[in-house]
């Protein structure tokens, strides 16, 4: 947050800042004028709020005297306040803007007659009435220290990514963000569980496996922000980054939208519904000027038909339901209460159906999630802000086989009923409080922020497993698998965190952010200290060049999935001779245990960047990020010996060391009418000395080994944007090219062959295009889109047979290819 009060000194001052080997000379006076002999007494306090009365931080303010003299610039703080001092009395022009909002201009601000003014910024949205609005242009923010990328509501709704109803598929539009074949996202080389996921300020990460599984209607999202480095101590454990989802709220007008309410059809083995993914949202006032609501409903029905399977056993349906309900009431102008309730339900009666796994081998899958939250914002005189909130999250998953027939694995597929049923239930109770203190002045301006976060997690899991067999190509028995017991267990964890942050504005061109965070949980039972420091400085007085750098210690949350692996049971694999009748002793036992005195994984992250405004409203940014992880959790095979006998006796140890280096270049060009083009190139390397994942269902009889992570992509280029065409048509496009993901090779005994990640998928390339036009019909406004995903029919594979002993070795699968798309949206009344 940059300094909003200017100070004049008797002599010119220069501050020399050395960050990451770069020395920057910055003057204390933003405009470089000499100290006047007498200060003007006039001042002006500007408070910036949105249409619901919530303070808008980090808004840019320009106060221009009517006589054309030098303008005063400032930025709103957490309480939405920006104070200008040493002003000349008289008429001024005020302009306030922030990306994601419509800019506001006021030519009638009379300094000296009034000491305060309130400005309301309206969020950008799909207006259906004709109004003159001005989009806030992108700009270099001198007070922004964090390395982050953002998607606004238009990019979320209108860019043609492959699954436009799921925000996880939009996240790879951002540099440094990749999505694996399971739909999970990775930020700057990190695993999914190292990313801290937030919804409106509350933790929504799965409390057991750390995955991002919660679904929110994309229509309800105002913005998605991914912070990959230099994020402040306010944010909790997450060495990979911060993923923040921000949803909207209604205003004083009733509005509604509807999307994809007409199902699509397929002509595969007859005419059937292919997919039906309706979404709808209603917003409006409960009481105008005081209380508002939002309700965003989404549904999904998909029918997957497998041509290779016989009729009557060739299809699987998937259904999904979700709803986000929010309400806000302004108890007083300075006390705002907000509550929300998110519901997710998913079901698939034949989960896992494909040509190799017929109907009888599938699972009946069900999962659900509920998240309820309440937050209170209280504003006090002088700029003090107190934010308090509580949230309750509940997750439940169930997987049930179709029966109890013996399960058999053949070289060409599987038969019988799956051998395992599982059910888990987890709950997180979260309480948080953040306090922003009034600005203090000492060698500049200080804005202090304090906070605490308390979490309680409970987890229950049960398994029921049966024996199963693995056969060879000639039909003889190769292996028989048995399990010891049917475990049922529970685990709890309490977490406590506190932080203190200072935003120190030495001048309008230099900001330093020191912070300290403390974390504790009952698994590690140690106080974790996380110091962090970041700084931002403008190199030129015109504000067109900025450098930024920072470093910090980051910890990961304790993974209950890792800790509870010893409780999931044991497995015995009996291997047979070539005849399939004689057991080759001894059986191989797979089991897990946790080393005593386990430590929390720790990362040292540092980064530096340069931003520059180029001609023609083009912005350039160059960013370097380095991460070094220590004490990472990984299971080490303790039973391997020189005789080569198979073993799978795993112990959790602090042996993992992660490395990530990346250099990224981004360009963004803005045009009139909210059109823009974005492009980026990233050169990176994500490595570790422990990249293998061990589990009971599909064990590896090998030692832990190092190599590239399975989401490593050394080179990546991407571009997307909106371009105007003829007759009010718009073109939206996405281009994505990258090196293929690495994969490892194994033999029929499930042993690693060669180093991990020794092979790669073919290079990935995708070009998606969509043409869209808005029109009026039957008194309503509509939007119609037609387009094509993967227009070049690249057929990017997502699966491969990596068994070196298989006749289908290196056969790629999971290919989709070119897909025609369409969408119709109801945007409300004309």
Image (cartoon, grey):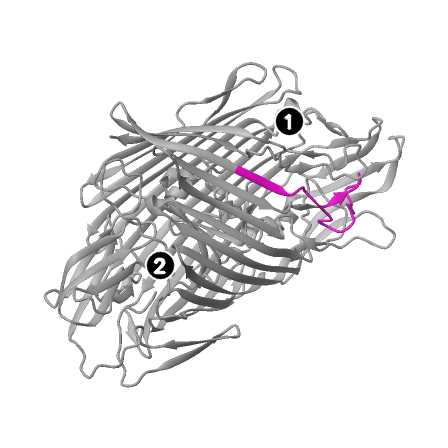
The magenta segment is: 744-767
* Residue wearing tag 2: 433
Q: Is residue 478 left or right of residue 485?
A: right
Is residue 117 visible in the rendered image? The answer is yes
**Foreground residue among 391 and 410:** 410
Dot 1: what SS? loop
State which quadrant residue 690 falls in. bottom right
420 is higher (above) or lower (below) than 371: above
**Foreground residue among 546 and 829:** 546
Q: Residues within 10 Å of mark 2 (few under 14, many from 20)?
A: some
Q: Name the N-terminal-most of marks 1 and 2.
A: 1
Q: Position of residue 439 (x, y in %)?
A: 28, 70
640 is higher (above) or lower (below) than 250: below
State which quadrant residue 684 falls in. bottom right
* Residue wearing tag 1: 354
Is residue 371 visible in the rendered image? The answer is no
Mark drawn on residue 279: none
Q: Is residue 438 left or right of residue 821?
A: left
> Could you tell me which residue is drawn at 36 percent across and 32 percent down?
773
């Amino acid at each position: 947050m940059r300094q909003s009060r200017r100070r004049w000194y008797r002599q010119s001052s220069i501050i020399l800042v050395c960050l990451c080997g770069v020395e920057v000379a910055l003057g204390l006076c933003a405009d470089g004028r000499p100290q006047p002999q007498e200060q003007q007494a006039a001042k002006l306090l500007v408070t910036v709020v949105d249409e619901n009365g919530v303070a808008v931080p980090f808004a840019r303010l320009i106060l221009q005297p009517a006589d054309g003299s030098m303008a005063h610039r400032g930025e709103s703080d957490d309480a939405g306040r920006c104070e200008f001092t040493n002003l000349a009395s008289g008429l001024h022009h005020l302009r306030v803007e922030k990306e994601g909002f419509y800019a506001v201009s006021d030519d009638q601000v009379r300094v000296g007659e009034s000491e305060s003014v309130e400005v309301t910024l309206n969020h950008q949205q799909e207006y259906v009435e004709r109004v003159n609005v001005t989009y806030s242009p992108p700009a270099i923010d001198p007070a922004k220290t964090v390395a982050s990328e953002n998607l606004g509501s238009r990019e979320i709704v209108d860019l043609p990514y492959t699954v436009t109803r799921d925000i996880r598929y939009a996240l790879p539009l951002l540099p440094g963000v990749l999505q694996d074949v399971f739909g999970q996202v990775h930020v700057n080389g990190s695993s999914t569980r190292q990313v801290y996921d937030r919804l409106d300020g509350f933790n929504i990460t799965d409390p057991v496996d750390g995955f991002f599984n919660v679904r929110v209607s994309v229509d309800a999202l105002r913005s998605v922000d991914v912070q990959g480095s230099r994020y402040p101590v306010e944010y909790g454990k997450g060495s990979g980054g911060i993923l923040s989802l921000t949803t909207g709220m209604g205003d004083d007008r009733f509005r509604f939208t509807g999307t994809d309410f007409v199902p699509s059809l397929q002509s595969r083995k007859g005419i059937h519904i292919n997919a039906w993914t309706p979404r709808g949202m209603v917003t409006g006032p409960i009481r105008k000027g005081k209380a508002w609501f939002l309700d965003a409903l989404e549904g999904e029905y998909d029918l997957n038909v497998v041509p290779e399977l016989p009729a009557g056993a060739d299809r699987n349906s998937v259904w999904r339901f979700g709803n986000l309900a929010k309400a806000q009431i302004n108890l007083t102008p300075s006390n705002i209460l907000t509550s929300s309730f998110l519901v997710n339900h998913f079901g698939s009666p034949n989960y896992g159906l494909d040509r190799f796994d017929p109907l009888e081998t599938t699972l009946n899958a069900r999962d659900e999630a509920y998240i309820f939250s309440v937050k209170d914002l209280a504003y006090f005189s002088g700029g003090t802000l107190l934010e308090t909130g509580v949230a309750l999250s509940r997750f439940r998953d169930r997987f049930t086989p179709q029966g109890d027939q013996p399960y058999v694995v053949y070289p060409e597929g599987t038969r019988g009923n799956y051998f395992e049923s599982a059910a888990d239930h987890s709950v997180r109770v979260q309480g948080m409080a953040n306090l922003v203190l009034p600005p203090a002045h000492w060698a500049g301006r200080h804005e202090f922020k304090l906070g605490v976060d308390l979490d309680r997690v409970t987890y229950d899991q049960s398994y029921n497993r049966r024996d199963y067999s693995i056969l060879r190509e000639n039909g003889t028995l190769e292996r028989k698998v048995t399990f010891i017991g049917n475990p049922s267990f529970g685990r709890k964890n309490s977490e406590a965190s506190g932080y203190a942050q200072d935003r120190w504005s030495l001048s309008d061109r230099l900001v330093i952010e020191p912070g300290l965070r403390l974390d504790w949980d009952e698994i590690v039972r140690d106080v974790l200290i996380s110091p962090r420091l970041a700084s931002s400085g403008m190199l030129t007085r015109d504000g067109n060049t900025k450098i930024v750098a920072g470093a910090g210690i980051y910890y990961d949350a304790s993974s209950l999935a890792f800790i509870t692996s010893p409780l999931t049971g044991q497995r015995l694999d009996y291997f047979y001779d070539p005849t399939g009748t004689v057991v080759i002793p001894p059986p191989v036992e797979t089991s897990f245990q946790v080393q005593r005195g386990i430590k929390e994984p720790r990362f040292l992250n540092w980064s530096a960047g340069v931003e520059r405004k180029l001609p023609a409203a083009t912005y350039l940014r160059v960013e370097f990020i380095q991460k070094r992880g220590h004490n990472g959790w990984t299971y080490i095979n303790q039973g391997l010996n020189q005789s080569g006998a198979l073993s799978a006796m795993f112990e959790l140890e602090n042996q993992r060391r992660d490395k990530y280096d990346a250099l990224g270049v981004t360009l963004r060009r803005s045009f009139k009418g909210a059109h823009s083009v974005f492009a980026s190139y990233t050169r990176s390397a994500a490595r570790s000395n422990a990249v293998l994942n061990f589990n009971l269902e599909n064990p590896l009889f090998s030692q832990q080994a190092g190599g590239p992570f399975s989401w490593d992509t050394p080179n990546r280029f991407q571009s997307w944007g909106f371009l105007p065409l003829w007759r009010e048509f718009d073109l939206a496009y996405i281009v994505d090219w990258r090196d293929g993901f690495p994969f490892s090779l194994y033999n029929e005994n499930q042993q690693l062959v060669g180093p991990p990640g020794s092979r790669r998928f073919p290079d990935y390339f995708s070009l998606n295009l969509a043409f869209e036009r808005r029109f009026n019909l039957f008194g309503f406004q509509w939007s119609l889109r037609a387009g094509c995903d993967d227009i070049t029919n690249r057929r990017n594979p997502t699966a491969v047979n990596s068994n070196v002993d298989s006749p289908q070795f290196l056969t790629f699968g999971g290919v989709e290819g070119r897909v025609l798309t369409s969408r119709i949206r109801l945007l409300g009344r004309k």
